[in-house]
Structure formats: structure tokens, C-alpha cells
Image (cartoon, helix red, strand yellow):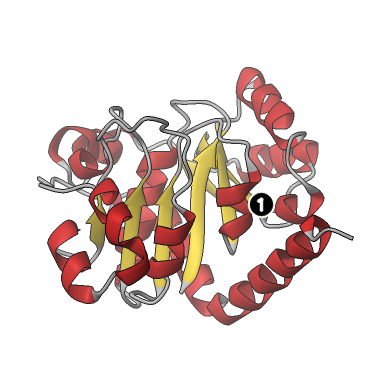
């Protein structure tokens, strides 16, 4: 399984919109799980018009023995084939990183998309990823917050980060490229303003990536296509980076 963590330095940047649409797009090229790690503010189920009866926290007690039957009971299935492990259930510590569960999930799908809470700067979850998609708006406050967030990342983890600039003005990719240059990150995608398609998804759960006329959906489909074509490379790079982190953490 290739693990993608979608996150942002501040709320309201559009990370959950990207995670849900990317999950739907990747499900068209292989089995895909979407893990919503948010607590009470989780909205991935609403963005996909699903009504989950379980959350990922239900799997924690059996994480080490997780099988397909357990997973089928805990997930909600979208029409695209995407399976959602919903969030929304308060835990003692919403920043807890379910590493054992994540390792178990890697045996059950080709792709795992993790919708991570904003501002999460600890390295456990991010270090587990093969790729971290860091979503930001192109305005100065968002870019400043993102820059500060990046300062807390170890070098090995930062190498996994690709920038996604959301709400970039249509026809102005240079704006997104300038943001990536300013943050010293590779630009994974720029997502144009698309109020109509995003409005339909927010209010009715209609994924923009399934809307042939949506410029936002088209940009996410293009990102998913690149990820599908580079999956083997992502896995090799992610494993190499995880090995470097373990080597640094290993006591002398």
C-alpha cells in the first residue's frame, strides 16, 4: 500500500476536500481507503454523502489482528469504490497517532489516504507516510503559517512533502509555483477556484472529481493520475526515508 497523508498548517485550507476527492479518484485505479483522523470536526462523511455507523477508533482494540471482515464492518463504501474509515468520535487525545492500525491497514488496499488534523507537527504519522501533501492557500498569512509549520519537521520527513496550493486563481499557475519556491517545496498540484463544484460537494456530498465540468475536479484527477503512475517510486522513496529515520532514532 502507498500511504498519502493530506494535511495543512491551519484549518480552512481545503485539506479534507482534497483528501476526499483524491480518494475517489485513486479508487478508480485500485482499492483505496480514506482514514479521517479528525475528531468532532470530521467532515469526510458529509463531503461524500455517507452515513457511517462506525469510526476508525472501533478498530483500535483489534488493530493487530485486523482482517477484511473487521474492515468491511467498520468502513462506509462510496459509489466510486472508495472505503471510508470515518472520524468524529472524541478520544482521550485526538493527537494520538494509531501506528499499529496504520500498519495493519497497509495489507488491505493499494492506497491509504489519511486526512490528518491541521497543524499536526509530530513526526510519527508524517514519518509513516510515503508522501505528505501539504495544502495551503496562496495568501500571506497561510504561507507564513505553513513556513513556521515546516520548521518543526525533521529533514527526512520534509523530503516527503509536496505542496498543494488551493484556490489559486484560474489560469495563474505561476502564483502556485511562486508559493512553492518561497517555501522551498516541490509543487505537487495547484487547485483552481471552483465555487460551484465545491459548493455542491459541501452541501450535497457530490465529489467534484466526478464532475466532468469542474476545473477543481480536473486538477485532482491529474494529480491522481501522476500518483498512480509513480506508485512504485513513491513506495521505494518512502521506505528509504523511513529507514533513515529509524537509523537516526536507533541508540548508539
**As displayed, is residue 240 above or below residue 42?**
below
Q: Residue at x 29, y 37 (%)?
A: 198
Q: Decide which of 200, 147 is in the foreground and name it.
A: 147
- Can you see residue 193? yes
Where does residue 64 sit, x and y in percent of width and height?
A: 37, 67
- In the rendering, at what x and y percent does residue 155 appear? 80, 50
Compared across the picture, whether 41 is left or right of 7 comes to left
Q: Residue furthest front?
A: 252
Most foreground residue, 78 or 60: 60
Q: Farthest residue toward the top?
A: 141
Q: Nearer the viewer, residue 107 or 225?
A: 107
Residue at the far right: name it: 252
Q: Quadrant of residue 150?
A: top right
Q: Is residue 40 above or below residue 4?
A: above
Figure check: 152 above or below 238 = above
- Relative to 38, residue 127 above or below: below
Is residue 211 among the parts visible in the rendering?
no
Dot 1 falls on a residue whose secondary structure is strand
Q: Is residue 97 left or right of residue 201?
A: right
Total numbered circles: 1
Residue at the disc numbered 1: 161
User: Where residue 50 appears, x then y in whole percent?
Assistant: 13, 48
Q: Residue at x 50, y 32 (%)?
A: 118
Nearest to the observer: residue 120 or residue 65: 65
Residue 19, given in percent of the width and then of the height, sits at: 39, 49
- The quarter holding residue 62 reads bottom left
Residue 95 lies left or right of residue 80; in this view the side is right
Quarter holding the C terminus is: bottom right
Q: Residues within 10 Å of mark 1 (few under 14, many from 20)?
A: many
- Residue at point 22%, 66% (across, down): 71
Amino acid at each position: 500500500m502507498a500511504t498519502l497523508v493530506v494535511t495543512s498548517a491551519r484549518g480552512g485550507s481545503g485539506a479534507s476536500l482534497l483528501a476526499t476527492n483524491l480518494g475517489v479518484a485513486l479508487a478508480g485505479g485500485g482499492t483505496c481507503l480514506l482514514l479521517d483522523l479528525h475528531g468532532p470536526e470530521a467532515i469526510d462523511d458529509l463531503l461524500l454523502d455517507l452515513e457511517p455507523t462506525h469510526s476508525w477508533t472501533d478498530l483500535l482494540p483489534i488493530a493487530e489482528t485486523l482482517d477484511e471482515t473487521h474492515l468491511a464492518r467498520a468502513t462506509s463504501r462510496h459509489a466510486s469504490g472508495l472505503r471510508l474509515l470515518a472520524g468524529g468520535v472524541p478520544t482521550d487525545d485526538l493527537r494520538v497517532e494509531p501506528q499499529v492500525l496504520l500498519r495493519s491497514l497497509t495489507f488491505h488496499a493499494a492506497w491509504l489516504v489519511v486526512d490528518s488534523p491541521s497543524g499536526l507537527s509530530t513526526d510519527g504519522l508524517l514519518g509513516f507516510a510515503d508522501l505528505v501533501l501539504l495544502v495551503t492557500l496562496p495568501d500571506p498569512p497561510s504561507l507564513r503559517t505553513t513556513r513556521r509549520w515546516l520548521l518543526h519537521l525533521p529533514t527526512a520527513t520534509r523530503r516527503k512533502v509536496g505542496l498543494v496550493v488551493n484556490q489559486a486563481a484560474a489560469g495563474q499557475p505561476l502564483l502556485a509555483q511562486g508559493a512553492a519556491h518561497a517555501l522551498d517545496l516541490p509543487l505537487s498540484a495547484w487547485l483552481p477556484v471552483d465555487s460551484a463544484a465545491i459548493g455542491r460537494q459541501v452541501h450535497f456530498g457530490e465529489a467534484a472529481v466526478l464532475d466532468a465540468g469542474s476545473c477543481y475536479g480536473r486538477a485532482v484527477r491529474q494529480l491522481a493520475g501522476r500518483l498512480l503512475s509513480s506508485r512504485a517510486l513513491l513506495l521505494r522513496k518512502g521506505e528509504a526515508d523511513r529507514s533513515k529515520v529509524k537509523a537516526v532514532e536507533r541508540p548508539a
